[in-house]
Image (cartoon, rainbow, N blue to C red):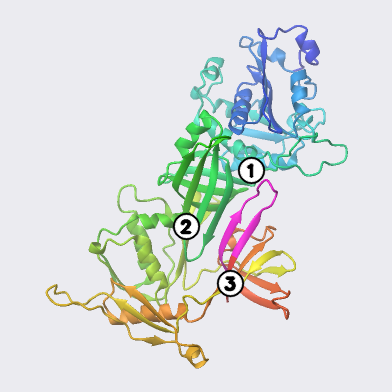
Amino acid sequence: MADTYANWAALSAVEVEGTDYRIEVRRTPSRLSHIAIHGGGIEPGSSEVADAVASASRQQYYGMISTKPAGQNATLHITSTHFDEPRCVALQSSVTQTLSYHGLGGTDEVTHLGGLDEDLRQRVGQALEAAGFLVEWTPGEEVGGTSPANIANRNRRRAGVQLEMTRGLRESFFPGHTTAQSVRDSGQRTEAFWRYVAAITSVVGPMDAPLPEPGPGLDWGPEAEAATPSLYRVEFTDLLTDTLIDVLPVAGLTFDDYIGRSGSLSGTVLVPDADYAARARAALIPGRTAVWVRRGSDVWWGGILWTATPAAPPRDVFTVDIQAGTFDTYLDHRTIFKTLESTQRDSAAVARSLIAYTREDANGDIGFRLDGTQKSGTLVDSFVSRFDQRRVKEVLDEMANAENGFEWRVNCFIDGSTGERVKAVHFGFPKIHSGATDIMLTSPGNILSYEFPSDATGTANVWQARGGSSNGNPALDSTPTLSAVMASVPEMAGGWPRLDGTSDYPDISRETVLDSRARADLERARTPVVIPSLTVVLDGQITPALLGGTVRLRIRDQWFSSGLDARYRVVGMRMTPLDRSGTEGAEIYLEAL
């Protein structure tokens, strides 16, 4: 249907501001705008979404809101390529990036994404899909938003994003599945509305970072700072149900993960106003909230929020510092309250049974996925007394470090068939391995810096393990059980000085078991620990999926003057996502093969 008015001059000559419509403008220092030129009753729900995202991200907002009676609002529709209301044009001329929100017909709950800002369009679309919304990536010509005259594209970059939300989607944002004015004006919104807003906010919220140099014919303005899109989305979910609570921008985000020990995450949630404070209080509940970090559609880290520290500084914005640990840390908070005993059972089955034990009681199942088909080929005897009140993770780690032990970690990813977030317990017998081919890392090349620390403070070539007493009579003196004294012959014969080491296992009183533990401890300690760490270019090869994978390391410099060419296994990774300086680092930790 043709528009009633060809442009704003024609509309404003007939319609009365304050009676037929109102203009909402909210200016902030941000370089990004959220505009809804068909707000109110024209395309119901579009201005509500734009307003909510702009508020959550503290970015600039414009809304042309029709206040006419139902059935008369369409007369105020001016197509995007002809929309030239002066306050909107002035706002657009001051910003570098834009999201323009519209309504479209149709009962399917879909967002048609258009516009000329392809990079931001991709990021917004991926975030919406990750939050469970359907996206149409190839909208038709009428809603494609590709005309340079489109108000979405009339910012300083000459490129914006246009979101065309179907009627079915917009209706899902309001109670009763209706966009009636009384419902919209009530302030009531559904979970879908806030999830949609949170998905977009996760992309645009952290975007006010320094600009690249403008291209030919473009002018960022004398004070403009471009928004470097956030590469990471931090999701906060309920630990028991994995229901999404919120998506909040996290400043100073760093996270790491390892084979053989727990990983961690830290960062700062900014709380600019009371609305954000309410969201943060609801989402940041230590011990109850799970934290997931996504890069694009992939999960890069998952764990449990353990501390949240609100702080009111004398100036600037209120903050909440957060710290989280990988999901395996949950097992440090589960105690074995019943005696568990196994005789000559595969160690993989014993390890799984320990994790399965945590599921038996109410509220004890946080969703660990176990592969019941894995076998280690090593039969073990296992006894854990309820009187010892040991932590599940402690017992698992002790089994892993034993002779003929194993490696384990919790692998987090998205199930491709269901879209669910997954916490899969991954065992390696004896080691975790991933990837079919080596990743090549070179210096000079994609290695930015490296360290090769060699640490002999824990080195030993002679070892004895001490256990508990085998004496069950409290009236008699008790002495601990001792393993045999073990020696590493190659090191002693090679001229190493004698270096002694000991370990304690107060819950073990059988000499054969102690001997096995002593041999395993000696094997780990007999040479200095060398764990190379590299800071590398994040070029698409380096992802958390590389943990357990192999790299081929080639270095030629002053230290390795003859050249180093060796294969290593990746046993740890630490990420420092994109910050305002524009740098993103990946530090990986290696083990020699």
Q: Secondary structure at mark 1?
A: helix
Residue 295 shows in the view: yes
Quarter of the rendering occupied by the N terminus:
top right
Asked if residue 501 lies left or right of residue 232, the reply is left
N-terminal of the pair, mark 3 or mark 1, is 1
Give the residue pinned by disc 2. 424
Between the C-alphas of marks 2 and 1, the distance is: 24 Å
The residue at 55%/49% (across/down) is: 293
Q: Which residue type carries mark 1?
A: Gln
Between the C-alphas of marks 2 and 3, the distance is: 32 Å
Q: Nearer the viewer, residue 511 or 20?
A: 511
Give the residue pinned by disc 3. 453
Asked if residue 531 lies left or right of residue 376, the reply is right
Mark in the foreground, 2 or 3: 3
Q: Which residue type carries mark 3?
A: Pro
Give the residue pinned by disc 1. 126
Asked if residue 303 lies left or right of residue 545, the reply is left
Mark in the foreground, 3 or 1: 3
Q: Nearer the viewer, residue 523 or 453?
A: 453
Q: Is residue 583 magenta?
A: yes
